[in-house]
Amino acid sequence: MDPVVGDDGHPFDLLKLPERARTSLLKHLSVWNLMNLRLVCKDVKAWVENPDVLKRLCVHVKQRNFLKKLIKSNVKWSNLMMLCDTNDVTSNWIQSEDYLRTFAKLNTSLRILKFAEQRLAYNRGLDMILSNCTQLQTLEIGTLDLSNADLPVNKRVLESLATLETLTISYVAWETEKDLQFFPEILSGCKNLRVFKIPFILQARMYSLYPDSDEDEIDQKHAKMMEQMLFKPLKHMLQDTDRKCSLRFLDVENCEFEQILGGLASACKQAGCLLLNVVEALEAPLPQKQKEFFEIIASLMNCSVHLDLTRLKNLASIIIDADSAQSSDINKTMKDAPLPALKDVTLTLTNSILQSERFASCFLQQKRDSLESVSVNFQDLKGSAQASVFRSPKFATSLQFLRSLSLDGFDGNPEDYFLFWNNFSLLESLKLQNCRTLTDNCLIGPDRENPTLLKLKHLTKVTIEDGELTDSSLEVVFPKIDLEVLILALPKVTNAGLLYLKTGILGKSLMVFQCIQPEDCSDQHFKDMLKCFENLKKHELLF
Amino acid sequence: MALVRVISSDGAAFLVSQRLAKRSGKLKTEIETFRKSSDNSEAQPEIRIVTIRAEILRLVLQWLQQHQNDPVLPANQNEQDGRGDAEMGQSQWDRDFLAPMDLGIVMELILAANHLEVKGLLDITCKLVESKITGRTVDEIRTAFKLKSDFKGNEEEQTRLENRWCVEN
């Protein structure tokens, strides 16, 4: 075997870095530094031009001549995110040959295209971009000008749109109602669309079309047009029985039509699509009875590209699954996002995605005084990976206002549990499922007369399923807590253990009791035992 | 405590706990291979690392010891999602650890971390190298890494022109 390093050590040789180190090094460098490196020597230039390095680059195109230079570049860009925020908002610039040549060059590689601040005309230019960029996954447009759009939409554009997953258009300008036929057409082509932002069809044109109408009449006509051109095709898409609807998120930030949106909510629910308003969160204009459909963000997995989490000032609840936590976009913006109104967090973490654990440690160790409920499912994330999140005093102290904690698959040691009991003094609800290492010691601690769990003076609901708890906990801990709800599915508990529960203050406070009937407990004994709870309203046997 | 003897290319032996050694992907594989092939379950594995000298091996073990409670990062972690690894993992201790090293030692440490599959160490050493590139001119980079331009004719000028799209607005 050739020695990897010489005996005497040697000067740093950039070119001899192993592939893994090279990738690790280049992934942190900005585009400017990467371009600079290309000038060092031929070998380093070849390194940088590796498509695997370039694919993460985001080119922020600020001016038109910027693109001219990009065209001249011989760099084989494999995947560029283009953010165009030029001040040039005239609607014809996209027709410029320069732009078209650039996009033609990127036709099979471009995945994300953003014109966030621009007014784009739907004309030959955009038509060509959409027909050529056949791998486009995300398209974001500030204002789409459909004035005298050339309809029907080109067949090649519709074919290209089949790959689109996120379509975000904030505003739509138009000339005749016929222009708006654009939406039913493109929605029919978007076969894999997962995120769609309902655009606001600008109202100004209506005043010139109906000069004799008053404001109320204009509003009514406008609402009718929105319904006809947008909501109807959307509803059709959601209810299409021939093919399963791919839509997962409907962004309603720009939607002002309470009644129509309420009608759409039922179709969304049936199709498994969630309404979300990424900026105003709970202030979305939904009828009160439909609020239940307005789950703000159920999964960030597919809407991360256009979500700026730092702006979600009203976000109250978030569910993050393994895939969304894996997303680098989420990791970057989410871990530090202040989310001042956040009350509930549900996390699913897996071992296959280590990033999620790092994300979790960052996110949960932020100071979050508003957070009341944390639910973590560890799935197959074990041992030290869990510890990095939960063994940190920072985690416990940053969530000191927590009222509900649910852990599934947590395999912490007694010290981890003591950290929780010592810091989460406001905890009212505790749920521990499949926690294999949960022993009596985790609840009792060193002093049997004064169990550590008793530090949670506000605890009213406890659910413990599986784990190693024995009759000892039922004797020493639970009778001393005035719980209202107790749900136990503990395989090691016996009849004798259950009998301890009716003693102490628990005998008076308990209202709901669910448990597995121990093998050594007859039906009659069980019924007799239940009678001892003075205020029991509901009881159920678990199987 | 189960131990393993790790021997450097220049013959220096390091006795370390197997728990610690297993935080290196390479050593973990070697220990498991030894276990499978050994009749005596109590036997102490001995692993020769013929590519790493004692001074460097000591540094790797020192780093592993300091980070023994960190989660183990997979060597093949998705690169696109791995942004920020080094920032996440780099502590004041890491900075103090790397501070006195010259680039030659850093290079050896990178090669050793790569060979022994210690992702966290690889990340922080690469981050150090990155800091020698970030914001430097081309000449400064060439000097720092003892590299010479091998562009011929107007090749360098041509590359410079290609770069204009990102360096000038």
Image (tube, grey):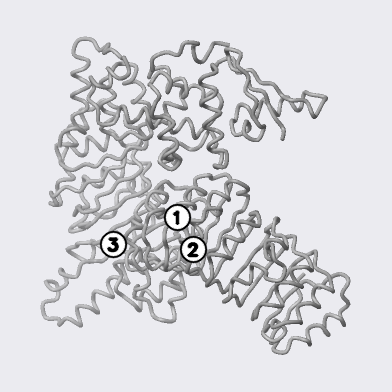
Instruction: Decide which of A92, A461 is in the foreground and name it.
Output: A461
- Nearest-to-viewer mark from 2 and 3: 2
User: Cα distance, mark 3 to mark 1?
Assistant: 44 Å
The disc label shown at residue A5, or none: none
Residues at discs 2 and 1 in contact (Cβ within 8 Å): yes
Instruction: Decide which of A173, A365 is in the foreground and name it.
Output: A365
Quadrant position of the N terminus of chain A in the picture = top right
- Nearest-to-viewer mark from 2 and 1: 1
Point 45% across, 67% down: residue: A371
Q: Residues within 10 Å of mark 3 (few under 14, many from 20)?
A: some
Q: Residues within 10 Å of mark 1 (few under 14, many from 20)?
A: some
Question: Judging from the image, what secondary structure is the residue with disc 3 in?
Answer: helix
Amino acid under disc 3: Gln
Q: Compared to A257, does A251 lie above or below?
A: above
Could you tell me residue A458's position as x and y percent? Answer: 57, 76
Q: Which residue is mark 1?
A: A363
Which quadrant of the structure image shows residue A95?
top left
Amino acid under disc 1: Phe
Amino acid under disc 2: Val
Q: Earlier in the sequence, mark 3 or mark 1?
A: 3
Q: Which residue is mark 2?
A: A345
Could you tell me residue B57's position as x and y percent? Answer: 54, 22
Quadrant position of the C terminus of chain A in the picture = bottom right
The disc label shown at residue A181, or none: 3
Question: Judging from the image, what secondary structure is the residue with disc 2 in?
Answer: strand
